[in-house]
Every structure is written in C-alpha cells, then in structure tokens.
Image (cartoon, rainbow, N blue to C red):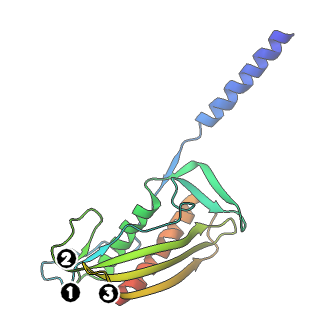
Amino acid sequence: MMNLQKKILLLGCILALAGCASTPTQYLTLSAQTSAPVPQTLQAQGLPILVAHVQMPADLDRMYFTTLQGQHRLDVANHVRWAAPLGGMAQKVLAQDLASELPEKNVLMPGDPLPHGPYLLVTVNIQSFLPSNDGQVLLRADWFIQHMPDGHIQKQGRNQFEQHHIAKSPEAQAAAMSRLLTRLSHVVAQHLS
C-alpha cells in the first residue's frame, strides 16, 4: 500500500514538473512606432543629439514582465520576460523616434561614439511605466535637454501619458508602452526642433 502511494506521489511530481517545463518563455521588446529614420546627411542642422540611458525605478526595470495589480501589489509573470533591460530598450526607442521626427538633425543611436565638441543630451527619468490589470498603461516621466559638455539645462519638462482599454495580453501591453514612449519623444522633439 505504501509503495503504491509513493509511486502515485512520484508520478504527480513528474507530471507537475513536465507541466512547468512545457510552458515556453515568451520574450517581449519595445519598438519605435514612427516610420524608419530617414538617412541623415553630413549637413545635419544644429548640434548632434544623444539620448542617455533611460533611468527607471528598480521595481520597473526588471527582466520579468510586471503588471500593477491594484495600488500596492505587482504581478511578476513567470514565463514572460523582456528581451533586454527596459531602460536600454526605452533609450533605443526614444532615439529611433527622435531620428524619425527630426530627419534634419543628427540623432545618435545608443552605442554610437560621443561626438567631438558640443552636443545636446536628452535625459529621461521615468517614475511610472507599468500596465495595470484594469487595461491601462501609464507613463510618467521627467525629461531634460542639456547642452554638453557644460551640462547647462536648456529645456525640461514633466509629462504623463495614458492609454486605456488595452487587452490584458503582454504583447498588447508592450505595444501600448511603445506607443507612450513615442508620445513622449514627440513632446521632446518639439523642444529640439
């Protein structure tokens, strides 16, 4: 009798482990929403523009996809991850969107060498950037445009953008987050043109 119970328990454990192993991990990314950047010429107007790594609170910048469940609880997905750190992906999306919106400017992409001489540095500090279980995504961020290398702040702002009625799938929520970054880049681009 005891031997049969052990076999049933062992079989149950094996089936549970097999069920966990059968769920594939899904990888998400943020993507630019504007058209592909127009190739920039050597006659770009004004100072080169560099987007700094986007700063995010530690509870947002994690590898696992996270949603807000009420006011004080986060839900971390088991099998849904970001393909790269969220702050780095946001930096890339903002740079790509700015390059599309400002084709006459020289917008540097992440990893490009720093320009020799003066340039404009766009710094973004995100306070809130999570989808919630009620179908909303909120982006709250401060941004700064600094003249480098002296660091003088030329423009700054604080913006909040929301999207409502988002499907609860991680893909739809990631797409909504990308759209909100595009809205932020549009505001910043107006101050760079």
Tag 3's secondary structure? helix
Tell me the quarter of the picture where residue 92 sits. Answer: bottom left
Q: CA distance from mark 1 to mark 3?
A: 9 Å
Q: Is residue 1 left or right of residue 141?
A: right
Q: Which residue is mark 3?
A: 192
Coordinates of residue 120 in the picture (x, y in percent): 28, 80
**CB-based contact (under 8 Å), mark 1 and mark 3:** no
Which callout, 3 or 2, points at the residue further toward the start of the chain? 2
Q: Is residue 77 left or right of residue 63?
A: right
Q: CA distance from mark 3 to mark 2?
A: 16 Å
Q: Quadrant of the C terminus?
A: bottom left
Which callout, 1 or 3, points at the residue further toward the start of the chain? 1
Q: Quadrant of the N terminus?
A: top right
Amino acid at circle 1:
Gly
Q: Which residue is mark 1?
A: 46
Labelled disc at residue 40: 2
Q: Is residue 4 left or right of residue 189?
A: right
